[in-house]
Image (tube, grey):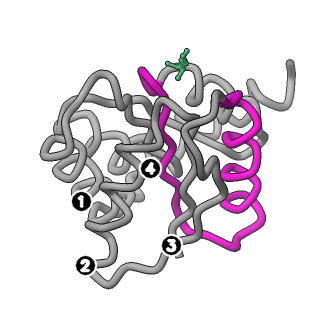
Amino acid sequence: MIALGSDHAGLELKNAIKLHLDERKIDYKDYGTYTTDSADYAVYAEKTARAVVNGECRLGLLFCGTGVGISMAANKVRGIRACCCSDKFSAEMTRLHNDANILCLGGRVIDVEKAIELVDVFLDTEFSNDERHIRRIAQITDLENRF
Ligand code: RB5
């Protein structure tokens, strides 16, 4: 199960990705927003991040205008490693090296074709489990626990 969330500025791109996930027969749950009314991205970042950290969903996809605000909010949730990407290399590496659990995309930054490319590589790439990356992620968790 994949968790989805957006504000109004990410809604259109989120809806396009839902169609793509339907085509790929990938199950998802959409935590809102559901309309184009102005919405606060932190609200939907929290709902989506919660579904990922409590294990209901294995990964999350978040959408706002730039992908930036919603990634900042999601990263405040303990256990979330959210990455805002607009290139395929970063979307792949953030799974391989950072074990990112949420990908954040900007509806005002990238088009649907690019978003599909990034979502596919993000969902299809497993964490490397390499010892040095495990160590570095543990250091991120340590920072989270100390501040
Ligand atoms: C909303 O206008 C916009 O600020 C928001 O979607 C996002 O881009 C913030 O980072």
Q: Is residue 75 above or below residue 100?
A: above
User: Left or right of 122: which side holds 66?
Assistant: right
CB-based contact (under 8 Å), mark 2 and mark 1: yes
> What SS does tag 2 mark?
loop
Within 10 Å of the Cα at label 2, are there few (<14), some (14-19), or many (20+) other Cα atoms? few
Label 3 near ligand 1 (CB < 8 Å): no
Q: Residue at x 61, y 70 (%)?
A: 57
Magenta stretch contains residue 40 = yes
Kindly identify the residue that appears in the image at 71 percent across and 28 percent down: 40
- Residue 74, by quadrant, is top right
Would you say the residues marked 4 and 2 are in contact, meaning their CB atoms lie under 8 Å apart? no
* Mark toward the start of the polypeptide (3 vs 4): 3
Residue picked out by circle 2: 24
Mark with earlier residue (1, 4): 1
Helix, strand or loop at mark 4: helix
Residue at which label 1 appears? 120
- According to the picture, the residue beneath numbered tag 4 turns out to be 131
- Which kind of residue does numbered mark 4 sit on? Glu
Residue flagged by tag 3: what amino acid is it? Tyr
Disc on res. 28: 3
Q: Nearer the viewer, mark 4 or mark 2?
A: 2
- 74 within the magenta span: no
Mark 4 vs mark 2, CA separation in Å: 32 Å
